[in-house]
Amino acid sequence: MSGGARRDRVLVVDFGAQYAQLIARRVREAHVYSEIVPRDITADEVRAMAPIGIVLSGGPASVYAEGAYHLDPAILGLGIPVLGICYGHQAIAHALDGVVSRTDRAEFGKTGLDVRRPSALFDGMPDRQTVWMSHRDTVTGAPEGFRVTASTPDSPVAAMEDPERRICGVQFHPEVAHTPLGQEVLKRFLYDVCGARPTWTNASIIEESVAAVRTAVGGERAICGLSGGVDSGVAAALVHKAIGDQLTCVFIDHGLLRSGEAEQVEETFRANFHVDLIHVKAADRFLDALAGVEEPEEKRKIIGETFIRVFEEVAAGLSDAGFLVQGTLYPDVIESGTRDAAKIKSHHNVGGLPEDMAFELVEPLRDLFKDEVRAVGEELGLPEDLVWRQPFPGPGLAVRIIGEVTRERLDLLRAADAIILEEIRRAGLYREIWQAFGVLPAIRSVGVQGDERTYAHPLIVRAVTSEDAMTADWARLPYEVLERISNRVINEIPGINRVAYDISSKPPSTIEWE
Ligand code: XMP
């Protein structure tokens, strides 16, 4: 479902994925819709998308590198405003016969930028600013028609503008937090150079999504798998706003959830939103299937397969449903097909799609970044706990119990996990920590409690910081927080007599233990 025709659109040409995604997010934070397009996009394709502006992203390459991506020069002749950033700045200079010089020296980190006027990008801003640089090649001669609007000691053409053609370039990175006035520079480009209107807001996102879902689904029935997490929850709330009782949500409780999660799904969706909710209490079935199984991949496989079977059975009873709601996000859309990372673990997404089912998909979050999904969730009135919930794996606590998953061990871990999260929240750390949880290993150790010898389980506390779960670092939790967790877990949970903190990063470890 792509955006309606009313909203202004800016294209971000992807010369390097991370750079492009960050720029696209910053443009949207300025309330202008942005879309990432591949670097080999042609001028005809750009024209067909009718953007009000184009941003060329930074990238790791040199314009002189073998196989370097060159911009289709005709894009610069479309009459659409263009802003080149870092590599994009050099690509403009290269395409329009300016001079890009190879230097031996890299300019990296914070630099002082001297601004020259007049300049659309720096209008009303200080003459000297701090900007963040990361480049080796540098533009030493601006193309004809351009004026140089800023320089640094190592970059004589750190910024340039052609007011006639409305083409600008900056060598620094306005999209990063290390460039304090970067967002202002982007806004000058969007509002003053492109003439954008602030049409991308939570309200407009919801309004457009609701309209698009109504058109797509018509009078038919849709099903949505709920996991208790933010993506499926926001997707369900949006679709419910669009089609009301034509939506049936299915929540499969596999018995591997954390304390209070099933109740929260009931309360949020059935009690508050009055959603038609099928709550499948399937803990027995999952635990029976997992009995005696210790091997991590085998556990994951059983949970994934059982999940699909249960989902199919429920779906069979909803044979009039033609649509399935998925909480696919924009980064998944951008990256699908391009990511070929080695498989470390077989991931399973609760609320995921049995591949051979004959549904049409409804993906109301397809255009959204995670922070936008959260903002929309808050706007729709979903509870804070759900909107800000830390990621939780589809196979749930099963991948945090080493060895066999039994009811007793689940109860132990659930109780300990609740204490960990309570203390993390109490310390005000919940949002800055990517995930915090407990792990129950398959060992016991000796302790002494109230004059008595104990022989009980240890609990491992894991808390990590991360941007995207691809890499992670162990969180430097304050000792007092660790102390409270340790005291409470050992005193309040019979069966645990020791607490350890996992100080491994990813790689070489993974976030989950299985
Ligand atoms: P690892 O353990 O591979 O985890 O470092 C990376 C991130 O993915 C989450 N995770 C899963 N999420 N289904 C999911 O939806 C899964 O099967 C699954 N396994 C791991 C994990 O919690 C972390 O955020």
Image (cartoon, grey):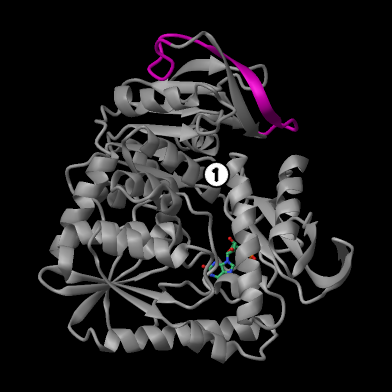
Is residue 410 visible to the viewer in this orientation of the structure? yes
Residue 58 location (% of width, % of height): 53, 40
Judging by the rendered image, the residue that carries numbered circle 1 is: 431
Task: Give the vertical position of 248 relative to 26 (above or below).
Answer: below
Residue at x-position 88% and y-position 63%: 448
The prevailing secondary structure element of the residues shown in magenta is: loop
- In what quadrant does ligand 1 lie? bottom right
Residue 100, by quadrant, is top right
Tell me, yes or no, whether the highlighted magenta stretch contains residue 265: no
Asked whether 24 or 266 is in front, the reply is 266
Magenta stretch in the rendered image: 102-124
Asked whether 133 or 269 is in front, the reply is 269
Residue 436 location (% of width, % of height): 63, 54
**Three-letter code, disc 1:** Arg
Tell me, yes or no, whether the highlighted magenta stretch contains residue 122: yes
Q: Is 458 placed left or right of 60 in the picture?
A: right
Task: Give the vertical position of 464 relative to 107 (above or below).
Answer: below
| Mark 1: few/some/many CA within 10 Å (<14, 14-19, 20+) | few
Residue at x-position 55% and y-position 91%: 288
